[in-house]
Amino acid sequence: MGFRLPAIRRASSKAVNVPKGYLAVYVGEKMKRFVIPMSYLNQLSFQDLLGQVEEEFGYDHPMGGLTIPCTEDAFLHITSRLNGL
């Protein structure tokens, strides 16, 4: 028996509330805000992405949230694979 993870959501910059069980991340050069399921944090490919971010940029993020400075396309590719689990 499997389960399907909910899809990521593009969040408008005006959206402040994040639903329970989700977290906001900022992605790419334009720092587009996405709201993703917290369950992604348990996935190896997402942990690898966060490890690469830590190595290159450390923990000092000016947005105050989790900043992932990869391209938006790369982020969407990784998260789309997680949605298929």
Image (cartoon, helix red, strand yellow):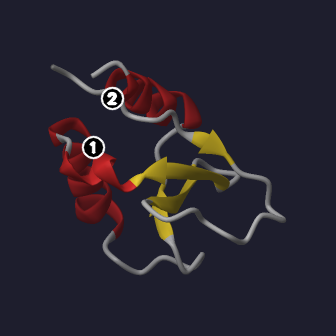
At x 25%, y 51%, the residue is: 52
Q: CA distance from mark 1 to mark 2?
A: 8 Å
Label 2 near label 1: C-beta < 8 Å?
A: yes
Is disc 2 placed on a helix, strand or loop? helix
- Rendered residue at 60%/65% (across/down): 18
Residue under numbered circle 2? 82
Q: Earlier in the sequence, mark 1 or mark 2?
A: 1
Q: Is residue 9 above or below residue 61?
A: above
In the foreground, 8 or 1: 1
Mark 2, other Cα within 10 Å: few <14 / some 14–19 / many ≥20: many
**For the residue labelled by badge 1, is the local secondary structure a helix, a strand or a loop?**
helix
36 vs 11, left or right, is left
Residue 66: give x, y in percent of width and height.
46, 67
Residue bearing the label numbered 1: 46
Residue 62 is labelled as none
Q: 3 left or right of 18?
A: left
Q: How many marks?
A: 2
Name the amino acid, label 2: Leu
Q: Amino acid at mark 1?
A: Phe
Residue 36: percent from left, percent from top: 48, 49
Q: Among all residues in the image, which is located at the extreme front?
A: 1
The residue depicted at 49 percent of the width and 65 percent of the height is 20
Quarter placement of the C terminus: top left
